[in-house]
Structure formats: structure tokens, C-alpha cells
Image: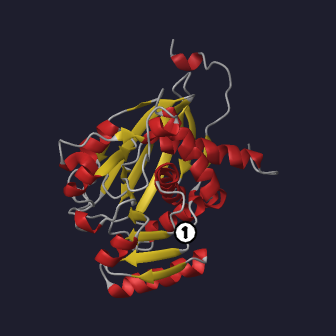
Amino acid sequence: MTDSAFPGPTVPGPAFLGESESAALVDDELALAAAREAFLATATGSVFPVVIGRSPVPGTRFTLKSGCADGLVGVKIGSFWPGNTGLPRHSSTIVLLDPATGRLSAVVEAATANAYRTAAADALAVDLLAREDSRTLTVIGTGHQALHEVRAVSRVRPIDRVLVVGRRAEAARAFAAEVTAVTGVTAHPADARTGIAAADVLVTATTAREPLFDASWVAPGTHISAMGADGPGKQELPVALYDRASLFCDLPDQSLAIGEFQHTTAATPVALGAVLAGEADGRTAREQITVFDSSGFALQDLTLAAALLRRRAAVPGEPR
């Protein structure tokens, strides 16, 4: 007799949260709270090796990041299809499993929410590591993610000036104007050396595969949040900077394997979750340079998906 003869108890079907709905539900406050939850969960949760795949279409890439913690089990699938026409090139889908049964619990499309999630991790590092009086934010990069980074960092420090460094002068000017229009913070384009030297907080949001600047340009007391290195060969920061800085990251093993610190065997980064939990020191001196490498990890995605589902359940008239 087959298993189908004993269907067992009836259980609710898996929840589904589509891209438009998750985009409407997410905001910086939710993303930052989910990030705090995820980084604290690194003490007791588990993450598993990142799987990188490609389709037969040239240039495409997808990654699978999986983990479990505090009643959450699942995987995030992030994809990049550069040839898409009329569709976003990036997508993000989070799959939650029932921890007790392994059955599908929820599917959350979260491309927009993923941008908030990534910026929230960098902003959390700023909140924990940057000087309290940080007012000048320099961002390297003029793409979609960079605006999320500016907005998130501006929520945790009294930023009143943004300097934009881009590969193309016209892109930097346009992005600076957009920052001012969206956030109300005065933004100006700047060359790399000027922008980096003036920064209280520096955020790098690029797809670079070589250092973006010279280590000597970084002033004492600067905090740097770098989010671009999330795969083999990617790099935004000069290795020479590490001798002058205190190094932090989301997951040390992952950061050394596919993150910013893959480029030196001498790096010994501290997990940001340990700083958040009070188990490790963060900034200990005003002149200290701090560097945070964000390579991204599954617990961020699982806590984000759970937070989005909770928010939807709390909306009157929405399906539970």
C-alpha cells in the first residue's frame, strides 16, 4: 500500500509572498530589526557553504545560501541574469521550511527587500562601529544598491553631507541629485581621493574585482562598510589598509573564503554578531579605522522573510 493511502492530518498550504507585496511591506526599520536578529542568531544558528551555479545562458549566475536558527530553516536563491530585457537583472527568492517536518512553509519573492536587507547589515555595522558624531558619508558606486546604503546609514548617524564617487562623472552627478531629492541630505560628486579623505563613513557598493582606492587616502577614525565582495575574485578594498584597521565581518569563515578578506591570509576579522552581543570589542578609540566586510549570509534572509510574513499577518484584511 502506498503512502498516499494515509494522507495524514490536513495542514495549511505554504504561504506565498510575491515581489510586489514584499516590496510594499519592507522598510528600513523592518530590515534593520531583522538584521539585528540575524547577527545575534549567528551565535547559536548554523549556516552552510554557499553554492554558486550558472545556467546555459552566458553570463548568468545564481547562489544558494542556506541556514537554520531559532525555528527558521531555509534557503535564499539569488540570481543575476544580465541579459534580461524588460525584467530586473537581479532576483531573490527565500524558501522557508517547517523545522519539524521539512515541508515547504513559505516562499517569499524579495528582490526589493533584499536591497534593504543588504543595506541594513552595513548600517548595523555603522551603528556599532562608526564614531557617534559621523556626519560625512562617502559612497563609492552609483547603482541601485547605493541609494539604499545612503538611506540606511543616514538613519543611524547624523549624516548631513554625502559625497558620491563614481566611475563616470555624469553618473555621479545624477546620483548625487537623486540622493538629495530622496533623502533631503545634501550630496555632491567627488573624486575618489577627496571623497575618501573626507569620509567619516565610507560605503563601497560596487562589483569591483580590484581595489577602488589607495589605503593611504583613508583618514584616522573612518569607518568602512564594504558590501561588494561576495564571490571568488571580487575585491573593493586595498589589502594594505588591513594593517591600519580593525577588521570585522558577518561570518569570518565565509569572509575569508568569498568575501573581502579572501585576498590575504593575514586577516583575522571579528564577527559583528559578537560585537552586537557584547562579547567582542568594537571601536575602542576615536582615531581607530574600522572595516566591516558584508558577504551576506542566509540567516539575514530567513529573519527578513519571517519579518515580512509577520508584518503581512498584522495588516487588517490581509490573508494570514
Where residue 270 appears, x then y in whole percent?
36, 39
Q: How is the image coloured?
A: secondary structure
At numbered mark 1, what does the secondary structure look like: helix, strand or loop?
loop
Where residue 292 appears, x then y in whole percent?
38, 51
User: Residue 151, relative to residue 96: is it above or below?
Assistant: below
How many numbered marks have been drawn onto this rendered protein structure? 1
Q: Is residue 51 visible?
A: yes
Where residue 318 appears, x then y in whole percent?
76, 50
Per the image, the residue denoted by label 1 is 159
Q: Is residue 26 visible?
A: no
Q: Is residue 225 left or right of residue 305?
A: left
**Closest to the observer: 173 or 129?**
129
Q: Quadrant of residue 267?
A: top left
Where residue 246 appears, x then y in whole percent?
33, 47
User: Residue 218, relative to residue 302: is it above or below?
Assistant: below
**Closest to the observer: 162 or 255?**
162
Q: In this view, which residue lies farthest toward the right?
A: 316
Question: Residue at point 32% right, 69% down?
Answer: 83
Question: Residue at point 48% right, 70% down?
Answer: 136
Question: Residue at point 52% right, 68% down?
Answer: 135
Task: Give amino acid for label 1.
Answer: Ile
Circle 1 Cα neighbour tier, 10 Å, few/some/many (<14 / 14–19 / ≥20): many
Q: Quadrant of residue 189?
A: bottom left
Q: Is residue 262 left or right of residue 169?
A: left
Quadrant into which the C terminus falls: top right
Question: Residue at point 51% right, 51% down?
Answer: 124
User: Residue 300, relative to residue 288: is it above or below?
Assistant: above
